[in-house]
Image: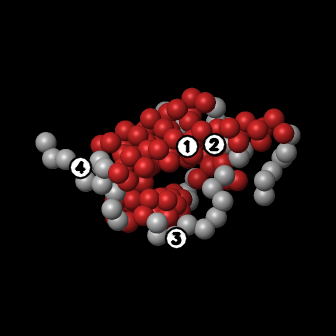
Amino acid sequence: MLENRDILCLDDVKKLVDTFYTKVRNDALLAPIFNERIQDRWPQHLEKMYAFWQTLLLDEHTYFGSPFPPHAQLPVQHEHFTQWMQLFTETVEELFSGEKAAEAKWRAGKMAEMFEFKIERFRSSGIQSLR
């Protein structure tokens, strides 16, 4: 069995993002939420995700923005974050191994925790929009 290599370049980031979001788009729990929100803007969303993960993992600053506001009003619960994290971890482990692969899983886990916490706080605050 061939050992997977680490996440080293933008092509690796694109492979990770494309594979992961293919799974999301076909997942019974996550697909309805993502497809309803993104609709026909998947190419733009994927480009944004390439830049986001390129910035985080490769230290190449191509993402500028605030990732939380677009997610603040999503109709998601704990089980959505659990499934998102399961698919992300599974994807990384299928494709890559090494320090950056471990970092990607760690960062995704921290992001899921933070977003879940912030969405719950946003809902309980009564604020209508972050925009």
Q: Is residue 115 left or right of residue 59?
A: right
> Which image quadrant is residue 33 in?
top right
Q: Is residue 69 left or right of residue 23?
A: right
Q: Which residue is mark 4?
A: 4
Q: Looking at the picture, which amino acid does disc 2 mark?
A: Met
**Mark 1–mark 2 distance (CA, rounded to whole Å):** 6 Å
**Mark 4–mark 1 distance (CA, rounded to whole Å):** 24 Å
Numbered badge on residue 114: 2
Q: Which residue is mark 3?
A: 62
Residue that extends furthest to the front in the rendered view of this protein: 99
Q: Looking at the picture, which amino acid does disc 1 mark?
A: Lys
In the rendered structure, are the residues bearing label 1 and label 2 in contact, judged by CB atoms less than 8 Å apart? yes
In the rendered structure, are the residues bearing label 3 and label 1 in contact, judged by CB atoms less than 8 Å apart? no
Name the spot of residue 80 as percent of width and height, x first. Answer: 56, 34
Mark 1 surroundings: few (<14), some (14-19) or many (≥20) residues within 10 A = few
**Mark 2–mark 4 distance (CA, rounded to whole Å):** 29 Å
Task: Pick whichever, 61 or 17, lies toward us.
Answer: 61
Name the spot of residue 121 as percent of width and height, x first. Answer: 76, 38
Mark 2 surroundings: few (<14), some (14-19) or many (≥20) residues within 10 A = few
